[in-house]
Image (tube, rainbow, N blue to C red):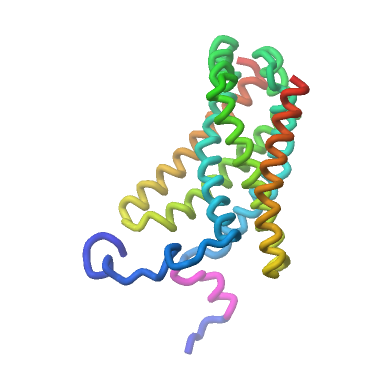
Amino acid sequence: MAGTGASDRRPLSPHLQVYKPMLSMMMSIIHRVTGAALYFGTFLLVWWLVAAAAGPEYFDFVNGLYGSWFGRIILFGYTWALLHHMIGGIRHFIWDTGRGFELETVEWMSKAAPVASVALTVAVWIIAYIVR
Amino acid sequence: MSMQTPLNKVRGLGSAKSGTEHWWLQRVTGIANLVLVVFFIFLIISLVGKGHGEVSATLGNPLVAIAMLALILSVTWHMCLGMQVIVEDYVQAEGWKIAILLANKFFCAAMAIAAIFAILNLSFGA
């Protein structure tokens, strides 16, 4: 396929640039972007687990990093990416059953998803600060 | 005209060499993630601000450890499948594609093994 040769210069089908940006399209892109972010974010969870197993000293070091203002910004973003990807996933499950393909429904879900993810993220952090 | 029966055609899976397993496993792990991540969020909320003693005791609790093991397996599997699709979509050079697909598998395996080791270590004691 790819490599060198005439097959490399095959014409490509029109891609993103020829389409007018739409909300449902942006949500699809964000679903993929949050998925990719969570992929690397998994390292933060694994590092934290390994730190807990390594002992108090190393755990305090990692905990200190996560608790710093910079760490909290990263973890806030992680929380949002996780919740947004989760809500996007639920949307996909609804579509997998063959439901929710009407334009109004797609538009409604596309608008509700970011609102719900931001609201849930803020709620999780408020609860975490209260019970701390 | 083909002499193959329809069933045999399906079993042969054609030139793609695979069927819907990838798509289906993405859904299976996705459903598992949905449940396990909700548990995980509550777990993290309960552990915010706690020191090493309390965190390691909670993570070492058998029920928590089992749920965390399930979470790690489901999440690393799900992210491996997801990243594979992203790479297959955007990386066109065949050599790079194979190299990055391999790196994807190794990264996900490393994450899973390290996390499982840590959880078992906290459960059974060092």
Residue numbers of the magenta segment? B6-15
* In the depicted structure, whether residue B12 falls above or below residue B39: below
Q: Does the magenta stretch include residue A95?
A: no
**Is residue A51 something that shows in the picture?**
no
Q: Where is residue A118 in the image (x, y as percent from the top left)?
A: 67, 41
B3 or A59: nearer the viewer = A59
Q: Does the magenta stretch include residue B12?
A: yes
Place residue A91 in its image quadrant. Answer: bottom right
Q: Position of residue A76 (x, y in %)?
A: 61, 32
B93 or A77: nearer the viewer = A77
Q: Is residue B124 left or right of residue A73?
A: right
B121 or B51: nearer the viewer = B51
- Residue at figure coordinates x 64%, y 45% from the top left: A84
- Residue at figure coordinates x 26%, y 60% from the top left: A3
Place residue B40 in its image quadrant. Answer: top right
Q: Position of residue B6 (x, y in %)?
A: 58, 79
Q: Residue furthest left?
A: A5
**Is residue B59 something that shows in the picture?**
yes
- Residue at figure coordinates x 68%, y 12% from the top left: B53
- Residue at figure coordinates x 50%, y 37% from the top left: A40
